[in-house]
Amino acid sequence: MTKTIVGLEVTEESVRAAEVTLGRKPQLIAYGEVPLAPGSARDSEVLDQGSVAVALRQLWTGARFKSRAAVLGVASRRILVREYTTQAMRPDLLREALPYQVQDLLPVPASQAVLDFYPLSQQGDQVSGLLVAAVAESIEQIISTLSRVKVRTQAVDLAAFGLARVTAPLASPDETVATVSIGDHTTQVVVSRAGIPQFVRILPIDVETAASRRHSLDLDVDVDGSKTPALEYAGSAGSTQQTRTRGLLRSATSPGLSDLAARLRSTLSFFASRPGASAPSQVFVTGAGAADATMPALASAIDIPLRLVNVTDVISTSAAPPAGEVSLNLVGTVGIALGEATR
């Protein structure tokens, strides 16, 4: 039997996962997304374990995932990602030294943080890279919730790294590109070359999508008076259900889109202005917030070619092809899984 791995994300609106085969040519074989009741979670943070656990059970059953091993992708405004330079040393020694070195940079004590360092370059005895810091309690809460439904967390990955990884084949090896994933409340920006992230920004911006509109309407009330989610879709090799709210559109003049366009422009300009930086030659745009009126709004603000990326642009699939916002959301989820699938 072909071995597989599941990439998983927890957002304020839903739990989402994609299962891909392991090996040199990964393939998407199943996917799903199940909505969460308001107040159950924030981006990469579980607030109500019971509610999220129920959704995870529905997700694994509805999508018919073969594997119960998952790579957890995290993306939150509470995650710190910044450039950092330190003394070159063995990876194990750096892991031990890092908490003491970066304590003054962290919003919480180092003992309460999960730290990672992604090395990018070395000059002499100095190594430079990306420092990633997340609140340990938030990560442990998600892992604990997954264990309640017998899903094993094989690894934890920054979602932005997955975005750089999954869009790498769309660019030439020496080309600098930016990938932007627009979520309901958080937009991720990663500038990369050959799939290696050079720069990451996580922008807290609310952009209306079908899922966020469902949340604003709270829950539908059934005839018997019980409440059920207004939106649910899942896909596997044998089944696909589409959201009933796919046709909802956003206004190109909404404050969220205007703010998003301005902040993306300033973020890309900041990166390009740094000494020795190579400005991105194109911008890949994905995520549910990239649908409808978003692309024209971004094109009017950013003087770089934009390309909308769906999941079928980055991986072949034996499952029923996803469509609409589902296909856009799955790009990042697949990228998370690919970190383990291609090892």
Image (tube, grey):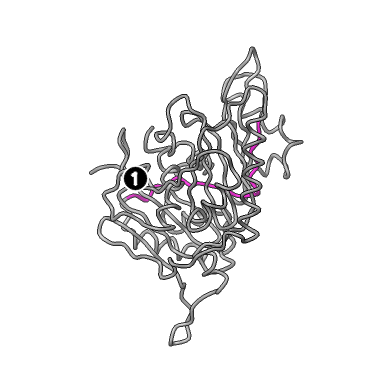
Q: Residue furthest left?
A: 1
Q: Is residue 131 left or right of residue 219?
A: right
Q: In front: 35, or 328?
A: 328
Q: In front: 143, or 63?
A: 63
**Does the magenta run of residues contain 70?**
yes
Q: In front: 238, or 100?
A: 238
Residue 338 image position (x, y, % from top left): 40, 39
Residue stretch in magenta: 67-83
Q: Residue furthest bottom?
A: 224
Occupied quadrant, residue 167: top left
Q: Residue furthest right?
A: 104
Quarter in which the N terminus is drawn = top left
Occupied quadrant, residue 128: top right
- Give the residue displayed 50% in from the left and 30% down from the top: 196
**Does the magenta run of residues contain 63?**
no
**Considering the numbered disc 1 on the image, is that residue within a helix, a strand or a loop?**
strand
Q: Residue furthest top?
A: 124
The type of residue carrying mark 1 is Val
Residue 302 image position (x, y, % from top left): 59, 43
Q: Which residue is mark 1?
A: 20
Quarter in which the C terminus is drawn = top left
